[in-house]
Image (cartoon, grey):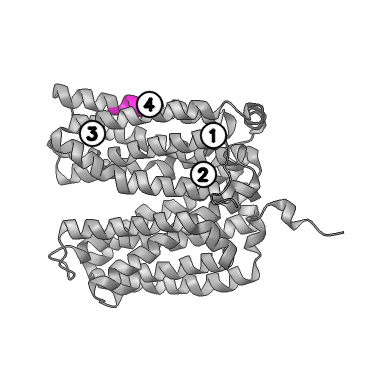
Amino acid sequence: MRLLPPSLGRPFNALWFGTGAANLGDGMALFVLPLLAIAADASPGGVAAVTVALTLAWPVFGLHAGWIVDRVDRRMLLSGVNLVRALVLSGLTISHLTGTLSLPLLLAAAVLLGVAETLVDTALTSTIPMVVEPAGRNRANARIEATINVTNELAGPPLAGLLAGLTLALATGASAALYVLAVAGLAMTALRRAPAEARTATAGGGNVVAGFRYLWRQPVVRTLTLFTAVMNIPWAVATALLVVYAVSPGPLDLTTAQYGLMLTAMAVGGLLAAAVVEPLRRRFGVTRLLIADAAGTVLLVAPVALGGPVWTVAAGAVIAGAGSSIWRILVATIRQNLSPPELLGRIYAASRVLSWGVIPASAALAGVAAELWGVRVVFVLATGLAVVVLGVFVPYALRTDLSAAIEPKVDHQPVA
């Protein structure tokens, strides 16, 4: 009896290794960049500007990233962009060591790293269908999601903090080295299925908005993208304001370390969900799992809206983190299976621009509303929106055969 699932193949394993190394570098870099800004004597506004620079790329450059991904060898692009990220982090390391680090230099680096993220994320999700057959894609997406959770959210920040405690240059230098290590793994990915990749890259003509047009005409992908965008509004509220509510002098009176543990628990929830998403899908089906995530979005914000004790806020965060991980895995597989390979990069980028584009604006509006009416009022509004989304999504999911987009096509052929 086989105790472990069958291997997804050496090309995927190489892609998987490269993803892990690169995301560990990401997690460290995102943690250390604000510290570098402080070291460069930036004001609080300057430190915040670094974060803004990191997040602007998706709404500004996302569609162009998809166009680029569809026109080049995707695995070569992954390797090249990781090399650029290594050079950027190496430059910051040298600047810090030589005392020439400045806020403008950090902002330029943050913009480059943000653009690199759009290219890497788009190329990654577009490469999986080229190295994994439809029957294995959900497992492949789950492994990628779990790896990102572990490296980017769990391991990266504390490792960067440990190294930064010795010297910031050590943290940035280690991040650069991890990007180089990712290139070594990704190079092995190109050993197989290169002809298919080349044919796809050649076929990927069309303009920047071709993926957006296809997404809008594909009813399932379009609808799931729009639901994702609206559900991201409560997530943006939580991201922007939960720390204000939770950390002393907020009502929950947590220390920063305790709040960090809460966020870590949320990431662990996402990791565990990614590890068991395939058996959960077989047991409960795609529809029930996606409905459960929509309910989890309600639980993310409702405990604060209702003034619940700290354990309810933490439990809601963990459940929401698990549901979000499952949603991303299942929706990624649906999008991969329902999209033509030559447009997949642009379709992914278009969906990301729509679903992530709401986050900066929603977070900014949440901050203004909190100043005017208070944090709990904003969470009440977010909870109301999440409940409405759940109420609309349930009938849609029940009348739509979402499982058909996950299962291999061979399983759905008519029987003679």
Q: In the rendered structure, which disc, 1 or 2, sits on the residue that comes first in sequence?
A: 1
| Residues shaded magenta | 85-89
Q: Nearer the viewer, mark 1 or mark 3?
A: 3
Q: Which mark is residue 272?
A: none
CA–CA distance between discs 3 and 4? 15 Å
Question: Label 3's element?
Answer: helix
- Report the amino acid beneath label 2: Ala
Q: Main secondary structure of the magenta part?
A: helix
Figure check: 117 above or below 192: below
Q: How many labels sit on residues? A: 4
Q: Residue at x 50, y 39 (%)?
A: 124
Q: Camera-side residue: 51 or 286?
A: 286
Which label sits in the foreground, 2 or 4?
Answer: 4
Q: Does 213 sit left or right of 301 as displayed?
A: right
Residue topped by disc 2: 349
Q: Which percent across, then down, holds residue 143?
A: 48, 47
User: Which of disc 4 and disc 1 is earlier in sequence?
Assistant: 1
Mark 1 highlights which residue? Answer: 69
Q: Is residue 106 left or right of residue 267?
A: left
Disc 3: which residue: 171
First in sequence: mark 1 vs mark 3: 1
Residue 379 position by quadrant: bottom left
Q: Report if residue 154 is visible in the image.
A: yes
Label 3, label 2: how many angstroms apart (C-alpha)? 30 Å
Q: Earlier in the sequence, mark 2 or mark 4?
A: 4
Residue 180, label in figure: 4
Residue type, mark 1 in image = Val
